[in-house]
Image (spheres, rainbow, N blue to C red):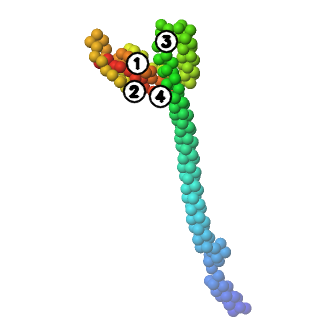
Amino acid sequence: MKLDEDIMEENLEDDTEEFNFEEDIDREDGTEENIDEKNSRLEEINRLEQEVREYKERLMRTAAEYDNFRKRTEKEKLQMYSNAMSKAILSILPAVDSLEMAEKSAEGGNESYKKGLSMVKAQFNEALKKLGVESFGEVGDDFNPDLHNAVSHIDDEKNEKENVVSEVFQKGYKLQDKVIRHAMVQVVN
C-alpha cells in the first residue's frame, strides 16, 4: 500500500505543479484584458472630458458674442433715433429762424402783429425744449470752435478779451450733447 500512497503523492504533486493558481486567477479576473479595457475606458473618458471642455468654451464664446451683439444693436438703435430726431429738428430750424427775423423786423410796427410773432416763437421754443433741444450762441460768449462757426473776425481795441462772440448771425442748437447746428458768429480778436 505504501507504493500506492507514493504514487498518489507523486500524482498530486504533478497535478499541483501543472495547476498554477495565479495564472488561473489571472484568467478568471482577466487582468490583462481588464487593464486594456480600463485603459480604453480611461482614454474614452479623457476624450469625452476634452469634448465637454471644447463645448463649454464654444458656449461661453457664443454667449459673449450674443451679449456683444445685443449691446451693439441697442447702441445702434439709440444712435438711429438720435440721428432721426436731429434731422427732424434741423428741418424745423429754418422756420424758427424766420420767426426770429420777422420778430426783429416788426419792431416799431403793429403791436398785435409783434405779439403774435412772439407767441408763435415761444411755442416753437417750448416744443424744442420739451424735445431736449437747447439753443446757444449769445453775444459775449467765449468762442468755442466745437459750438461756433466764425464767419468773420473784427479787431476791437476797446475789448480786453480775445476770441469773444461780438455778433450772432444764426443761433446754434444742440440735442443733449450733440450739436445739431453750429452757431454762425462774428468773433473779436
Give the residue displayed 53% in from the left and 26% down from the top: 92
Where the N terminus falls, by quadrant?
A: bottom right
62 over 87 or under it: above or below: below
Q: Residues within 10 Å of mark 4 (few under 14, many from 20)?
A: many
Amino acid type indicated by mark 1: Val
60 over 19 or under it: above or below: above
Does residue 99 appear in the picture of this structure?
A: yes
Separation of marks 4 and 3 at Cα, in angstroms: 28 Å
Amino acid type indicated by mark 4: Ile
Separation of marks 3 and 1 at Cα, in angstroms: 19 Å
Q: SS class of the residue under badge 2?
A: loop
- Numbered circles on residues, count: 4
Q: SS class of the residue under badge 1?
A: strand
Location of mark 1 (residue):
168
Tell me residue 5's x, y (percent): 70, 88
Give the residue displayed 41% in from the left and 20% down from the top: 169
Q: SS class of the residue under badge 3?
A: loop
Query: Does the CB distance between marks 1 and 4 fall below 8 Å?
Result: no
**Mark 1 vs mark 2: which is more N-terminal?**
2
Amino acid type indicated by mark 3: Ala
Location of mark 2 (residue):
146
Location of mark 4 (residue):
180
